[in-house]
Image (tube, rainbow, N blue to C red):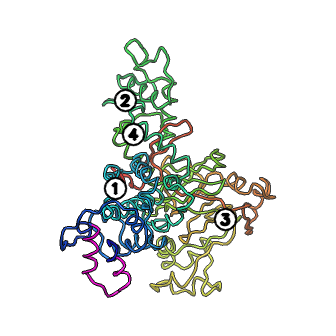
Amino acid sequence: MVFASIRRLVGDPSAGARHISGLATCLGLSCCLGLVPLQTAPAIPPQAGYISELAGPQALRAVLSTALTADLRTFGVDRDDLERFYAQRDFAPLFITDSGWRPDTISTLTLMQAAGAHGLKPANYWDEGLADLAGVEEPGRMLHQDLMLTAATLRYASDIYNGRFAKSPKQDPASLLAGFDDGSEDLPAFLAALAPNKPEYRGLQAVLASMRQGSALPLLGIGEGPLLSLGTRDPTVVQLRLHLAATGDLQLDSTHDGGSTGVEADRFDAALDTAVRAYQARHGLVVDGIIGRKSKARMNASPEDRLGLVLANLERLRWEERLISHKHVRVNIANFQLVAREGEEDRLSMPVVVGRNSRRTPVISDQIVSLKFSPDWTVPRSIFEKDYLSSLRADPGFAIVEGFEVYKDGALISPYRVQWHDPRISRKVTLRKPPSSYGPLGGVRFSLTNDMAIFLHDTPSTNLFDLSQRAHSSGCVRVAEPEALAAYLLEGTNWDDQRISRAMLAGSIQIVKPVEPVQVFLSYMTAFVDAYGRLQLVSDPYDLDEALISRLM
C-alpha cells in the first residue's frame, strides 16, 4: 500500500531517512524533496482511496518533516509558516479533498493571477499553476502542489493584507488564513476581502487599470522655454493649456483650443493663471501661478514615473490598519493636509505642519482617544536633549525664562539644583510646560495611543500654515483649525463650539473623550485620487518614493 510508509513514519519517531526516502519514492516526490530515489516508482492508477489518504494528516506531516524544496522557498514562506498553518487544520491539506482538488482551486489561482490589479506581480503567486495542476493519477504531484498552492495563498494573503514590503506586518500569514472557514466560505472571496477597504485604495486601483488599458488621458509634456506666468507669450503655453485640460484644471473653448487657429493659445491669460494655481495647490507646489522648474518637472513625469507612484502608494495603503470606524481622520504627511471623513464624505480639510526631515512624522495607524484642552507639555527626552540641554547647561535660568517646570522623582525643584552636565540628566529630570492656551501645544491636544509621543495639536505658530512646504515640527502634527477638528470629534457629546472655545482659553486642563475612538491614519501619500477621479502627484519631502518604487516595479 502506498501509504504504509506514512503510517510507519508517523507511528515510529525514530524512523529515519530510509522511511522519508521510501515515502518520497512511493509518492513520486523524490525530485521535490531533493532525495535520490532507490528505484523508479511504478505509475499509480487513479484510486479514490489514495486521494482520501492524501487528504488526511499523515502525508503532509511526513513531507513537512524535511527541508522545503527550492520551488516552495520562492514564495518567501518558510517551513514554520506552513507547519503553523497546517497545524491549525490538523495537517489536512487546503486544496486536496477526498474527491480531488477543492472546487474553487482554479478560481483561487485565477484571483491570484489578477494580482496586477493591486499593483503586485502575478509571478509571485505560482502563475504556472493554472496550466500544471496534477490529476488524481499523480497523488505525489498533487501533494506537492497542495504545498505550492498553500504557500502561494499564504504569500498572497499576506501581501494583500500587510503589504509586500511591510516593515511591521499586521498579522503573520498563517494566522491570517486561520480565519478562513473551510466548511462555509469561498476561498477566493475570503482572499479578496483582505484588500484595503478604503476609497483611496479603490481610486488608485481605478487609475492603475486605466493606465494599463491605455485609456488614461495622455498628458502632454511642457518643452524647454522661459518661465511661464501671467502675460507670457510662448509656444510652450499651448502645451501647458493642453496638459491642464487633460488634468481637468482648464476648460478649453473654441478660442483656446491649442490648435494653430487659436490666435490667443500661446498667451498666458487670466484663465490659465487660475488653472495653474489650482494645479499647484492640488499637487503641493508653491502656489504662485508660475511654471518654473519644479512645476514643469511634475507635469513632465513620464508614464512609467506615474505608474511607479501609483504602485508605491497602493503598497503604502496596504501597510495601514483596516478602516473600522465610521469617522476617521487622514493626515497626508507628503502634502501637509488633513481630511476628516464620515463614511466616504469629506467633512473637514485643513493644512497641517508635520515633522521636518531630521525629525520625521512616523507613518502609523492609530486612534484619537481624547482631547486635552489647555494642555500641559512634558518635553520628550529626544527634544530635551537636542533643543534645550545645551541652553540649560549654559544657564539653568533658561528654564525659568522659558516657563519650564523642572521635576525630579516627581517633585518640583529649582533648575539651579540640577547637575545639568550629568550625561544621564535627561533620564533623571523632567521638563514640563504648565497648562495654558498659549504653550507649544496651543489650546488643545488630540491624544493618540502610540508610545512615540506622537499626537495632533493646536499651535501658536500659525504663520507656518501659509507656507507651501510645511515640514517644520519635531514629529507631531500641528493642525490649522483645531476648533473645527475638536467639534467634529466631539459630535454627539454636550460640547458645542462655545464650550470648546472656552476650554481652549481656560488655562486649566480639561480632558474630554469622543463618543468612541476615531481612527487616524498618519499616511505618506505622494499619489492619490481626488474627488473628481483625477490622479494627484505631490511632493516627496522625505525622499521615500524611489527606494519603494524600485522594489515594486
Instruction: List x then y, in percent, for residue 231.
Output: 44, 24
Mark 3 residue type:
Val
Q: Which residue is mark 1?
A: 135
Disc 1 to disc 3, C-alpha distance: 56 Å
Foreground residue, 119 or 191? Answer: 191
Q: Which residues are magenta?
A: 5-27
Instruction: List x then y, in percent, for residue 486.
Output: 70, 56
Disc 3 to disc 2, C-alpha distance: 47 Å
Residue 213 occupies which quadrant of the picture? top left
Q: Which residue is mark 3?
A: 369
Per the rendering, the mark at residue 220 is 2
Residue 513 vertical position relative to residue 195 in the rendered view, above or below: below
Quarter occupied by the N terminus: bottom left
Magenta span contains residue 178: no
Q: Earlier in the sequence, mark 1 or mark 3?
A: 1
- Circle 2 — which element? loop
Mark 4 residue type:
Arg
Crowding at label 2, few (<14), some or many (≥20) Cα neighbours within 10 Å? some
Residue 545 vertical position relative to residue 232 in the rendered view, above or below: below
Disc 1 to disc 2, C-alpha distance: 53 Å
Mark 1 residue type:
Gly
Q: Earlier in the sequence, mark 3 or mark 2?
A: 2
Q: Nearer the viewer, mark 1 or mark 3?
A: 1
Q: Please say if the residues under marks 3 and 4 sit with CB atoms less than 8 Å apart.
A: no
